[in-house]
Amino acid sequence: MINKNTDPKLHEFWEKKLSVNYDVEYERYKKLCGLPYNKKTVDKNYPDEQEQDLLIYDVWYKSVIKSINRLTYDEKQEYFRYLEQKTRENEDRFTLAQTILAPFMVFFVSFMLSMLNDFMGEVYGVARSFGSLLIGCIVLSLYTFKELLGTKEAANRKYFYQDMKEILDNEIKGT
């Protein structure tokens, strides 16, 4: 999945240069980390791999090294910068959700409670306010759930790119 902020041409450039598909590698990485992953994607793209080999970090590490070794030293430096940017993108999304979501929730709940308080004396007002509060809470809960899943995904992608960066950094230092 390409982030909206990422230039698709740059993303595709590195996929072609390394002969990898980031979405497939990311699913394999999630399996390796014991996270929920897309089994069909992994099985389709690694049909010859033994199940236990897909769970061994060293096997994944060597496949990443094999891809990285297609690059010249200067290309490795550029690829490192690309991975650094991908890490930042996912880190920013994770931080943004944490800093905006919590205050928004507090504001929304306090607004709904104040609205309920304003109509406390009226039976019709209470029913209307309660209905609004209930609908608002349901919408907020769905939004919060969606955002929390998104931040978890962003954090996992950040870790993926950090591990790729670490492997590349070790390879650059060894070159």
Image: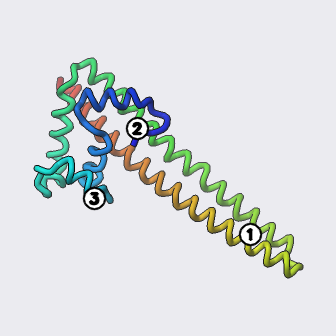
Q: Residue 132 carries which label?
A: 1
Say which of 21 and 93 sits in front.
21
Please provide percent x and percent y for residue 39.
Answer: 26, 57
Query: Where does the N terminus fall, quadrant-wise?
Result: top left
Quarter of the rendering containing residue 76? top left
In depth, the one of 70 and 128 nearer the eye is 128
Residue nearest the observer in this picture, 16 or 57:
16
Q: What distance separates the C-alpha of mark 3 from that of mark 1?
A: 41 Å
Residue receiving disc 2: 87
Label 1 is placed on what type of residue? Ser
Q: Which residue lies furthest to the top in this view?
A: 74
Sequence-wise first label, 2 or 1: 2
Of callouts 3 and 2, the N-terminal one: 3
Which residue is rendered at x = 21% and y = 37% of the image? Answer: 64
For marks 3 and 2, give the CA distance.
21 Å
Give the labeled residue for mark 3. 34
